[in-house]
Amino acid sequence: MMKIVAVKIDDIYVPTARRNELQQDKVDATVEQMLAGDDMKPIKVREGKGRMVLIEGVHRLEASKAVGETEIGAYIVQAPKF
């Protein structure tokens, strides 16, 4: 089972492909869930070039930024090998 780790939000790079998936209505809904006290599923990141790279969870990441969080729970996964 993967371990959830706290990752500094400022240390997470969001690739263009992930940024293009961003929908403000989903971010707003996630913010509402967070403010209501709902638990959020951890995002997925990988290590790359001295920083964390977002794999999954762009809406949760942006919602966390919106509510002023400095860290987010994440699974650290391996980069796919081609």
Image (cartoon, rainbow, N blue to C red):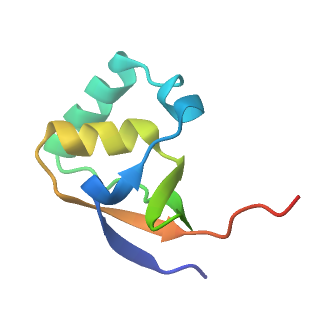
Using residue 36 as the reference point, say whether residue 4 is left or right of it. right
Q: Position of residue 66 (x, y in %)?
A: 17, 36
Residue at (53, 39) in percent of width and height: 15
Give coordinates of residue 9: x percent, y percent.
Answer: 28, 55
- In the image shown, does 67 or 1 lie closer to the viewer? 67
The answer to whether residue 39 is above or below residue 75 is above
Q: Name the residue located 23 percent from the left edge and 35 percent from the top edge.
A: 31
Displayed quadrant of residue 8:
bottom left
- Quadrant containing the N terminus is bottom right
Q: Which residue shows up at 43% across the image and 56% down it? A: 41
Residue 76 position, x and y percent, is 53, 70
Q: Is residue 46 above or below residue 65?
A: below
Q: Is residue 61 left or right of residue 34?
A: right
**30 horizontally vs 1: left or right:** left
> Where residue 81 sits in the image (x, y, percent)?
83, 64
Q: Is residue 65 left or right of residue 81?
A: left
